[in-house]
Amino acid sequence: MQYRHVIHTKRYGIIIILIPVFIGIFTFLLLIGPRVLNSGNIGWLERGDSAIHYLGWLFFRNTEWTFPIGLNPRFGLELGSAIVVSDSIPLLAFLFKPFSPLLPETFQYFGIWLLLCYVMQAWFAWKLTGLVSDDPLLRALGSIFFTLSPPMIDRIGIHYHLSLAGHFLILAALYFMLSKDLQKRKWAWGTLLAVASLVHAYLFAMVSILWVCDLVGKMLRKDLSFRNTSIEFVILLLTTSLVCWQAGYFSVGEGAIAVGFGFFRMNMLSPINSSAPYWSHTLMGFPGGDGDYEGFNYLGLGVLFLFILGLPALLSGRTGTWSLCQRFPILLLALLGLTLFALSNKIGLGLYNFEYSLPKSVLKIANIFRASGRMFWPVFYVLTLYAIFLIVRGYEKQVAVILLGVTLAVQLVDTSAGYRKIRKELMIERKSEWHTPLVAPFWEQAASKYTKVRFIPTRNDLPQWNTLSYYAATHNLSTDAVYLARVEKSVLENTKSKAMASIENGEYEADTLYILDEAYFRQAVFNINTDNDLVSKVDGFIVVAPRWKNRAGISSLEGETLATIIPLAVSGQRMPVNDSGVSLPYLSAGWSIPEAEHIWSDGEKAGIFFRFASKPPTSVLVEVIPLLGPTHTKQRVTVLVNSLPATEVNLTVGGKNEFRIPIPMNAIRKRDNLVKIDFLLPDAVRPKDIGINDDKRMLGIALAAFTVE
């Protein structure tokens, strides 16, 4: 009898262990679908930030090991890329890279990651609800609420932030804090911190905050001595610092500091805001700020009902809420701090806003985690757990089961407005290759001749970066055509300056294929050595291929492509420059965004570019608006025509807004009939600096129109 009882207990224990696993798998299949588990299926990764994640892994797996091991130099070149700044989940990248030669050519682990996230989410939800009740049915119902978390699912399908689906790390940290009998706490917290750092910086920050609060709280309650607290803090700080170093966190340097704190905030209505029509069939949602999507923290209609149903139990005093608050004061302070940080210093209540100032030093630190709205996630899960706590502790088991079951059904059905759309996007047909417009034979030939691909001007978010990165990755080339979570600003500027020097002197690295923006090509075309370098427009991309020497099948830009890129100017026709777009092809680099009646220069140099048919022009009449103010009364403009001095004017208050530029005969290029006019603007200034408004652009003149005469 005793033997049978032991066997029965073991079987029951195995079933108990499997319940959260089944919950995780079930909700994964319901919300995400099985197709992402196919490691050869990359079609669902082609959009949004998931493209960054996959390309980061693709470059990393095909790059020799570095030290630190998390560096990913071919994905970004001088921009200092590491596997951590492409959010490619370093934990799994490190795990799979040693086996890369054995893996298929097309291999992704992000589907496995999502399944792991759901299983672990259910597992730690099971552990957390076990602190409220040891009844398997109540724990199961409570756990499902956590796996139906709208903010977690939203990260996967709306933003494609796959690494940020690791919310189980937050649940694990909360369980470690709330558990009375955590064994081997140094190992538990150390492992959790290391894993979190190898998943995503934001999750690592949240887990770190909860760990420090747990450490302080247990020391104040005398559960830990000051000595043991100090030892644990030092050991785990050094350990996680080592892990972060190897993951490549420190390769970013000052690039970790970005801008956006206060924009990517959480709106105060976020917990009850379904962001209609995305996440509720019932609630309409509330409008808010443009960046409030980063603070999406909708609890769901079912959880909101739990709070309403639990209110009588709370007011009756039978839940023991007050004693619970007294036991975890540090946790409550941490949750309050996280909430305030999530709201930022630009507090929004729907469309209403209130702002308070912060010191620049504080804002600089805050901008490290500029998407502050995410920092509410620990609070979100504490609220979810507390809603379950009110029902379980406030009612008899049978009533609690009914209430949890009904509200769970409400949560499941109502939030299907959001997760069904996400599942549909993730369940697309299997694809082992991404669509690419680069289909000309040139690209295969270029891949055998060059080792790098660069885009000019250097940017971190250039249009079609993923097309060029995918080309480079699949042809074993390095590239700076990337989009990374963080980039060192000084390095970016240095790289941009080097690229601009190539444009100005016509000297390009022999092992590099260059892709030029059309505006910058108009500057570069004057200095390109077409005797040795190929210049062409291939599949919509302007390429400069150094020392190509006119390979068979590829024609030069001369004649054919110049006619399509550099427009022909009609003599005597006034050309207005505005957001209609008609005259924008005549603009070279140095201009800002076109407006209704003009376009502002941005920087100390801007220009226009055109071809003439046969008879050379004698002058160009330009109509401009100078940036002037009470303390800035003059704008000097030096004009170059085909790099030769043409004229210089001083634009002052009350002066004319138009002037004529003579075209020197010795500046005419007869072989291609090209005219490039550069405006040098030494008095360009930021409107903010002269008290006009808050505009931070370096403005000199606004070009309204020009006429070739």
Image (cartoon, rainbow, N blue to C red):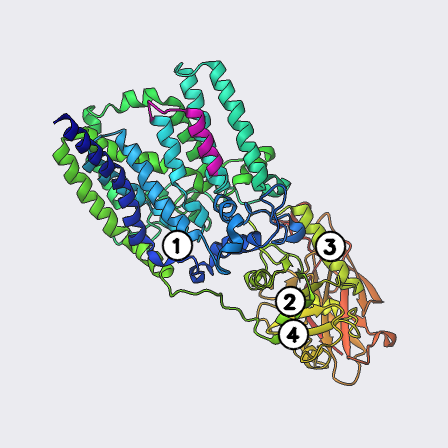
Closer to the N terminus: mark 4 or mark 3? 3
Q: Is residue 517 left or right of residue 390?
A: right
Q: Residues within 10 Å of mark 3 (few under 14, many from 20)?
A: some
Secondary structure under tag 1 reads: helix
Q: Are marks 4 and 2 in contact (CB under 8 Å)?
A: no
Amino acid under label 3? Answer: Ser
Residues at marks 1 and 2, CA–CA distance in whole angstroms = 34 Å
Q: Residues within 10 Å of mark 2 (few under 14, many from 20)?
A: some
Closer to the N terminus: mark 2 or mark 3? 2
Q: Which residue is mark 2?
A: 447
Q: Are marks 2 and 3 in contact (CB under 8 Å)?
A: no
Where is residue 317? Give x, y as percent: 20, 23
Front tag of 4 and 2: 2
Q: Quadrant of residue 708?
A: bottom right
Residues at marks 1 and 4, CA–CA distance in whole angstroms = 36 Å
Q: Which residue is mark 3?
A: 497
- Is any part of residue 245 visible from this angle? yes
Q: Which residue is mark 1?
A: 157
Task: Tell me the residue at 40%/53% (across/down).
Answer: 111
